[in-house]
Amino acid sequence: MYTWVGDIVKGILKKIKKYREENSKGFTLIEMIGVIVIMGLIMIVVFPTLSKMIHNNNNQEYTNYYSIIEEGAHVYAGTLTDKLGSSKYSGCAEITLDELINNGYVQAFDDKKVTCKTGSGNIKIRNDKGNITVNFQLNCSTGGKNEFITGTNDNNACNAYVMEEEINLKTKIDTAIPTSNKQVVGTDVYINGSNPNNYVWYSGKLWRVVSYSNSTEVVKAVTVDSITSIYFNHNNSSSYLGSDVETWLNNDFLTSLKEPQLFLASSSWNATNNTNTALNPSSNDKIVKEKVGLINTYEYGRISGWYGSGKYWLISEGTGANSLISNSGSVTSVSSTSMNGVRPVVTFASDTLVHSGSGTSSNPYIIDNSATATGKSGDAISSRYSGEYVNVNGSKYRIVSTDGENAKVIGISSQGKYRFSDNHYDYASSELRTKMEDKIKSNLITNGDFCADTINNGSIAYQSSKCLTPDRVNNSINIGIPKIGDLFTSNISGINTYWTINPNTEIDGSGTSYNATMNIINSDGSVGTSIITGSNDVVVVFYLDSSVKITGGKGTISSPYTLSK
């Protein structure tokens, strides 16, 4: 790199040698100048290299000090079991460099002229079931001037609570629920009482434990809210097997759950309408083996006190009718062609673990602690799960379904009271559609398929994943409203009645559509009707574009995902 310097030095030395051969006297001025020039050139070459060597040596010392701090923090983590726990825990602790120095795990940097400190995030120690990670930024300076910076600040705050030891759900419930809230029948235990702490959070939905088995250690749980409102059986049959509700539960609802093959056990559902049915049913009982079912009359009698009232289907078959929990909380029989609320029931597998929570409604037991439990910034919203919450234009919505590209969401509050139309039952042509699309605008929203099947008096089977009248599918709608069978279309807080997209009657008695009726959802989970010129609340449904990504939030109602394209 510096060969030109060598050439100059060689030239000067050659001339000095020649001059000395011709003159044997002392050093002349020219010789002195030559020596000075040579020394200057040597300095030009040597000084940058020497400076670089000193700088590299300092950087290596700083890098070594970073490693010493990191190793010291790993050792110190063993003393923080109250925050980090053991190999069965997950937790987080935030410490300072001074804390490590004062406790003898690290020595201060040995150059008193240099100040080394951690960045604004201090030192974060995280434990993920025995995997300890340490994150911090090291900043070394001299006289206030930065000399060296390495590492990355972990600006995510440590969890405000200590993650509990992972034990299976059955053991946790058995230990936490007092004896006064238990009814033991054989090897099964039912949870009763006014308000036991039996809440579980799974797959974007809040559940309550119905019972658990001391022999198989499986746990049966029901959703806190009614998830949809549909027929029991449109064929006017009381049989659960093959019914609309059985099909919906084990197709549309089951596929909305996160990894059911990991969390759920297959179960036997007893559809016999007998409050005295034994837990080990006789050969005459009507048993259906599936992943998802409903509460039966026997179970409902064992858990009275916390289940609540509303028009919700039970699995129990009657004679020409089906069992229903009424608004008063009593069990009654109604026609299978009426439409009422559905509260799905699942059986959690015996190896289902509790990762955190206390079982209350505000802090339920969390049984999903995997890497995908909460969406992360940059994740496509279409990769998330039914039941999670998003924020669009400052309002909260809930994911109904995803198809790998777009996410369908539903509002959790009313847009206000509106009439449907003055002369038409078709939502695509209604004034209600025009008003909603004028009111709600966002570049996050895209057009999607909306199905407007006419549904009345058991005239059509219902599966929410299908539109049974293909010519009623409209894919040009930007802002729609719910259809019968959509998830989260029952018991929306603070709303008495709201429109669905499904007509009940398309014409009135005179053969015109001016008094056509639409299906509406009632506050008790049942389905009623309203003429199109009537006034009802409006809950909107729309699709989020495939390019929409998460920018923040946890997907919960208190911390919905924030989004951008």
Image (cartoon, rainbow, N blue to C red):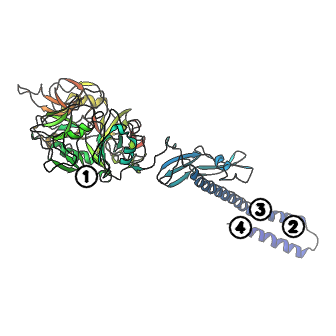
Left/right placement of residue 468 relative to residue 257 reads left
Q: Which residue is mark 3?
A: 43
Near mark 2 (Cα within 10 A), the count class, few <14, some 14-19 or many ≥20, is some
Horizontal relation, residue 501 to residue 170: left or right: left
Mark 2 lies on residue: 31
Observer-side mark, 1 or 3, equals 1
- The answer to whether the residue labelled 4 contacts the one labelled 2, judged by CB atoms less than 8 Å apart, is no
Callout 1 secondary element: loop
Disc 4 to disc 2, C-alpha distance: 21 Å
Q: Amino acid at mark 2?
A: Glu
Q: Earlier in the sequence, mark 1 or mark 4?
A: 4
Check disc 1: other Cα within 10 Å, few if <14, some if 14-19, many if 20+. Answer: some
Circle 3/circle 2 CB separation < 8 Å: no
User: Eyeballing the image, is 251 above or below 10?
Assistant: above
Earlier sequence position, callout 3 versus callout 4: 4
- Contact between marks 3 and 4 (CB within 8 A): the answer is no
Kind of residue sitting beneath label 1: Ser
Along the viewing direction, whichever of 504 and 477 lies nearer the viewer: 504
Q: Earlier in the sequence, mark 4 or mark 2?
A: 4
